[in-house]
Image (cartoon, rainbow, N blue to C red):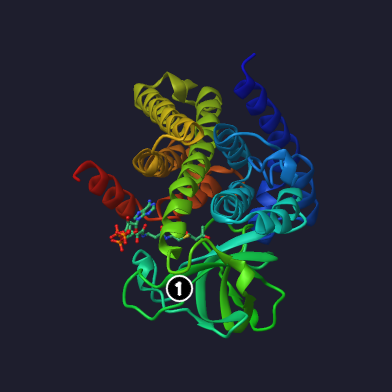
Amino acid sequence: MSEYQEIRDLASKFADSELAPLAAQVDKEARIPESTYQKLGENGFMGVYVPEEYGGAGMDYSSYAIIVEEISRACASTGVLISAQNSLAIWPILEFGNEQQKKEYLPRLASGEMVGCFCLSEPGAGSDAGSLTTMAEDCGDHFELTGTKNFITNGKEAKVAIVFAKTKKTDDYKGMSAFIVETETPGWSVIKCEDKLGIKGSSTAQIALDKVKVPKKNLLGEPERGFKVAMATLDGGRIGIAAQALGIGEAAFRYAKSYALERVQFGKPIASLQAIQFIIADMSTKLAAARHLVADSSRRKDEGVSYSKEGAQAKLFAAESAMWITTKAIQVLGGNGFIKDYPVERYFRDAKITEIYEGTSEIQRVVIASLELR
Ligand code: CAA
């Protein structure tokens, strides 16, 4: 058995036994139970590619993408929890952090003792991330951060945040710096948690920063190079979201397929109707293509080859496929697809966000086109 098959089997077993039975409840109550966080930490899923010397599971990015896919197949809310933890909170520290920062934060993030989040978006700065207005004032031995951050995944639970703020006032991305911020610092507050269409178990918070003191040692990377930290982090994060979309699509595909084989109309299972067969064929083909894109972009990342375009392609295709597959899955189930007794309406609601966060499908096209046309 290949190493990746073993990882898939392990993650799949965990997802089916620990997450799938709770997924409907997580959606309904809009909360992931505390025990799940603990189990994710114990199984190494909170720090998949953190090297063992920093307390992580020491796996590669390809393994991480497989784990996100399998977990999202069972519970998309838990999928984004680990995706934001690994791709958005841990990766920038691993890539841009100094030794002291790595030693201080990675073991606690990898064990799950600390949940992490990524604070880039603001009420006035979404796709145009460079236009953010949160300011970081230089106060000698520390900075003071003031501003508002929007749509922050894990924002309610996070103990540590990667925050982007301007150390120099500009209208564009220049002047932006990245910081590691401990959320228990006075001045940090969760203003509200959003009530959402899907991934309801995962928190999405609006955060206010009011003169939050950040020691100079917590500047992440070079001053005024924060936009590059954000963009490079999102390049990898997008592979994680592609894997999440793939997992949601796979869940809807499996459900639609087994339903079509059992549901009898006109005296035979609906799977014998060509209208249904063509849907199943297209679902299967889209999933196979998306899985190749996710695997290829992850492999490139592991091999140190450029992956910005391939990650954007994987996210664009996997997200739009997940939306198509979950919509068609409802159609295969008919009226049953529309009611909460069956899980496909949840898959449909969960799929939508994969076309939006970590860059909308339109932004993925901008990224792909700009890399193709230069
Ligand atoms: N890696 C490193 N550097 C990069 C880069 C990358 N992938 N992409 C661009 N840059 C650099 C450029 O080289 C350039 O650097 P120089 O100043 O040295 O020339 C600089 O960044 C500016 O590049 P652009 O001119 O291309 O930047 P832009 O302002 O036109 O923006 C964009 C490009 C692709 C539209 C970008 O703003 C973007 O990705 N927007 C979407 C933001 C996004 O994904 N937000 C989601 C937030 S996270 C989230 O969803 C919440 C959550 O918690 C899950």
The response on whether ligand 1 sits within 8 Å of label 1 is no
Measured from the top left, where is residue 101 in percent x and y?
66, 59
Within-10-Å neighbours for mark 1: few <14, some 14–19, many 20+ = many
Measured from the top left, where is residue 242 in percent x and y?
46, 42
User: Who's the residue at 44% across and 55% down the image?
Assistant: 358
Q: Residue furthest left?
A: 373
The reply to whether residue 180 is in sight is no
Q: Secondary structure at mark 1?
A: loop
Q: Quadrant of residue 300?
A: top left
Residue designated by label 1: 122
From the viewer's perspective, is residue 217 above or below residue 85? Answer: below
Image quadrant, ligand 1: bottom left
The reply to whether residue 15 is in sight is yes
Amino acid on which disc 1 is placed: Glu
User: Who's the residue at 69% across and 52% down the image?
Assistant: 106
User: Who's the residue at 52% across and 48% down the image?
Assistant: 345
Q: Residue furthest front?
A: 140
User: Does 16 sit left or right of 297 as displayed?
Assistant: right
Given residues 274 and 115, the one toward you in this image is 115
Q: Quadrant of residue 209?
A: bottom right
Measured from the top left, where is residue 308 in percent x and y?
38, 44
Q: In which quadrant is the N terminus drawn?
A: top right
Q: Quadrant of residue 74?
A: top right
Given residues 32 and 222, the one toward you in this image is 222
